[in-house]
Amino acid sequence: MPISPQQSEDLPKRKKLFVRLLRWTMTIIVLIIVALTTYYLVTRGDQLNSDLNEIVNTFSHKEAATAKPMEVSNDYKQALVKAQEYVDTLHLSEEGLRDKLRGKPDYFSANAAQYAIEHVKADYRANAVIRAREYAWNQHMDAESIDAKLTGIVDKFTPADADYAIQHVNDKPLGE
């Protein structure tokens, strides 16, 4: 069927009208969807939130239950054994322990030494008190000298640990 000249002129107008009508229809549909979603969230938001929390908790409990313990290398285990030995016998500070593990004769890696420091059973304040007593009783040092020794380049206790040790150097040792 042939198109008349009048129809050919009306074609762009019809197309524009159709596009406008389509745009308005799509805008109204989007507004309706937004309104319905908002209504649903407002009226059922608490239930939805608790359902989502339940789902998240279920997955996190399953992951925790199936998590394998971390495999520790032999180097890390040896560093931990040495660290415990040094802490118990030499009464080292944390930094002193790090230096001992990284230096002669052990030469543990920085990571192995850090692992050992994080897992060793040590009371660095108690170690500082023991070292302070050695300095006070065996070398007859005063508080200022003890503080300098404890925080110096050899012992490397923190200033807080050194202060604590000086305050408790004359306390009765445990077990007496």
Image (cartoon, rainbow, N blue to C red):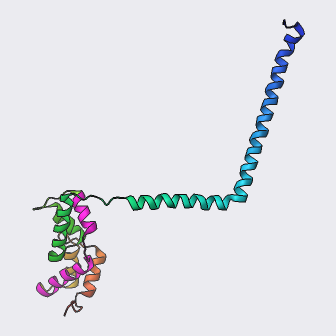
The residue sitting at 72% across, 54% down in the picture is 40
Q: How many numbered circles does the render carry?
A: 0
Q: Residue furthest top?
A: 2
Residue located farthest toward the left when viewing the structure as drawn: 105
Q: What are the residue bounds of the magenta stretch?
A: 111-138
Name the quarter where the N terminus is drawn.
top right
In the image shown, does 118 or 7 lie closer to the viewer?
7
| Residue displayed at 9% across by 62% down | 105
Q: Is residue 128 above or below residue 14?
A: below
Q: In the image, is residue 11 above or below residue 107? A: above
Q: Position of residue 85 (x, y in %)?
A: 15, 72
Q: Is 136 within the magenta?
A: yes
Q: Is residue 113 magenta?
A: yes
Viewer-proximal residue among 27 and 3 = 3
Residue at image position (23%, 67%) is 95
Residue 162: x percent and y percent? 26, 78
Indicate left or right for 55 with 78 as reference. Answer: right
Q: Quadrant of residue 112?
A: bottom left
Q: 53 or 13, which lies in front?
A: 53
